[in-house]
Image: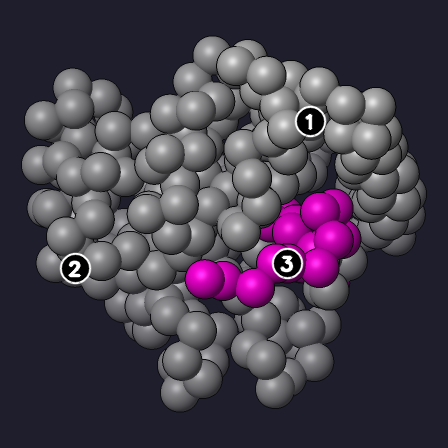
Amino acid sequence: MTDHRGEPESAAELHAVNGRTAELAANLVRLEERLVAACRAAGRSRDEVTVIAVTKTFPAADVRRLAGLGLRDIGENRDQEAAPKAAECADLDLRWHFVGQLQTNKARSVARYADLVHSVDRDRLVPVLAAAAGRADRELACLVQVSLQPTEGRGGVDPSGLLAVADLVAAAPELRLAGLMAMAPLDEDPVRAFSRLGPLIDALRGAHPAARIVSAGMSEDLEAAIVAGATHVRVGTALLGSRPSLR
């Protein structure tokens, strides 16, 4: 049981809380070692890469523990989980990243708490997000999600349509075009997949020089993404452990 402040009452609960914090701290140390090595191998500075802790299916208590360990960037895939979690952690100085595929009927909710939407992947989502950001009286930063294999089904605009969607985002006063997002196909070597990012990054930055963010790489393939130029990596399992089953 916990008391009315959400603090553990029993010694067993206190041990469990402290144990979880220690687990996350140890995972963070191992993750940091990987990041340092990957940046060194890529000839990049560690400071160039931001970790987004993807807390999908994990409780707000873990978000608080991560914040206590110095992580400010929190990623979520589903609005129905993200919205109440962001509200519960509103007292913390966090940046919330919406990284899942976004349904238009969830745009109004997401625009209230997200600082950066990674998954703008179609024309018709842009005016909906812009209107939602306007109602929330916020400027919403957006990434265009680009597919590295259109037939694979992980979402994203075809590379040939990247600039068209980017232009729409950049033209919306309520939105700010911040860069692009990509995922390696499940059935392809990530080094090969992410090697296709370079020309897309160059094309986007050539048309929109301020669009500097490259969100790519997850727990299993962050090294390949860093070599390819990722500025943000989305890490769940390597940081938080195996995910609880979705109810």
> Mark 1: which amino acid?
Arg
* 2 and 1 marks in contact (CB < 8 Å): no
SS at mark 2? loop
Q: Is residue 48 visible?
A: yes
Residue 232 within the magenta-colored segment of the rendering: yes
Q: Start and end of the magenta stretch?
A: 224-247
Mark sitting on residue 243: 3
SS at mark 1? helix
What residue appears at the point 13 percent right and 35 percent down from the top-left corner? Answer: 132
What residue appears at the point 12 percent right and 58 percent down from the top-left corner? Answer: 124
What residue appears at the point 52 percent right and 50 percent down from the top-left corner? Answer: 56
| Observer-nearest of 142 and 32 | 32
Badge nearest the viewer, 2 or 1: 1
- Residue 188 on image: x %, y %: 64, 84
Give the labeled residue for mark 2. Answer: 123
User: Sequence order check: which comes first, mark 2 or mark 1?
Assistant: 1
| Observer-nearest of 223 and 29 | 29
Q: Say above or below: 244 vs 44.
A: below
Residue 170 quadrant:
top left
What residue appears at the point 70 percent right and 80 percent down from the top-left corner? Answer: 189
